[in-house]
Image (cartoon, rainbow, N blue to C red):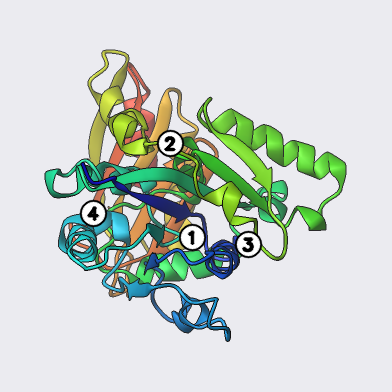
Amino acid sequence: MTPRIPATIVTGFLGAGKTTLIRNLIAQANGKRIALIVNEFGDMGFDGELLADCGDDDCKPDTVIELTNGCICCTVADDFLPTIEALLAREPAPDHIVIETSGLALPQPLVRAFTWPSVRHRVTIDGVVTVVDAAAVSEGRFAVDEVALAAQRAADPSLDHDDPIEELFEDQLSCADLIVLSKTDLLDAAAIAGVEAIVREGSRGAARSVHGTPNGLPSEILLGVGAAAEDDAFERKSHHDLEGEEHDHDDFDSFVVETKAWPSIDALGDAVRLAMGAAGVLRIKGRVVVTGKAAPAVVQAVGPRVETYFAPGDKAGRLVVIGARGLDRATVETHLKA
């Protein structure tokens, strides 16, 4: 029986250090034929030449494929699976496949793609590697440039999830087999300990974490993890998965508030913050029309964190409220219809 080709999924926000990590990995390939699939896109995204040619004949992947049609977790069937199938059809096939996701990607759908019949018996997920910007996390920002991340999100017409940055961070942690803490050289011991505590709280019990370096990590650390993540692909839950389970639970309730055009995005944000303060409210999300703006305003609110930003989309004028059974619906509607 032909051995399955190992694949490594590298995820993390823009600026976390994914490209440095992969560049160093390729430089230490030791003759392995590494196929690289890259999903950063747009003006603030990835420049394929950074990895396609390191200026050294020993520092080149066997193949570089850029998926630029949008966030990889939203284009799995259209882009990713055909790409993997094409790589498997090559002679010779690659020795290892490395996938760098967009900073906006949920890793869970990508992991589950490896259970597809045409792929499962040919490829195994050696490990999901999440790169965490320790310096940003220590400041409560999660990503070094949240403005660039929001711009990338707004520029991606394929994106079908509007998760707040905090939720994306948690999803990337909870799916990881190996967590690389980058930029720890910028922090003191107390700050590093704080970041490590956050990572431990959000990661799977089987995951381990290491400190990165400005020059990446040895390939022996990143390859050969042996996680076979496809075997428990559907046990690695994202917020979307858990939210779906909550909707089926008797202790939770949800309803839709129809709202007219708002005079400004600031007024909308203030109203959502007031609504989030009502007893029992856990989350508010949706799209709302703002007077004078061509694109609707996207609302994502979880706990004390409220995000509002403009992005293309339809079904504007509806806000979904999710919370505990018996939440103060009248107060919520008063704020969101004001």
**Amino acid type of disc 4?**
Gly
Extreme-bottom residue of the structure: 55
**Amino acid type of disc 1?**
Asp
Horizontal and vertical percent for residue 263? 38, 64
Q: Do the residues labelled 4 and 3 touch (CB within 8 Å)?
A: no
Q: In this view, does 52 lie above or below 11?
A: below
Whole-number angstrom distance, CA of label 1 to CA of label 4: 16 Å
Which of marks 4 and 2 precedes in the sequence? 2
Which of marks 2 and 3 precedes in the sequence? 3
Q: Is mark 2 on a helix, strand or loop?
A: loop
Q: Name the residue under label 4.
A: 317
Residue count near mark 3 (Cα–Cα under 10 Å), binned few <14, some 14–19, many ≥20: some
**Amino acid type of disc 2?**
Ala
Extreme-left residue of the structure: 117
Residue count near mark 2 (Cα–Cα under 10 Å), binned few <14, some 14–19, many ≥20: many
Horizontal and vertical percent for residue 222? 55, 50
Q: Mark 2 points at which residue?
A: 227
Q: Name the residue under label 1.
A: 266
Q: Is mark 3 on a helix, strand or loop?
A: loop
Which of marks 1 and 2 precedes in the sequence? 2
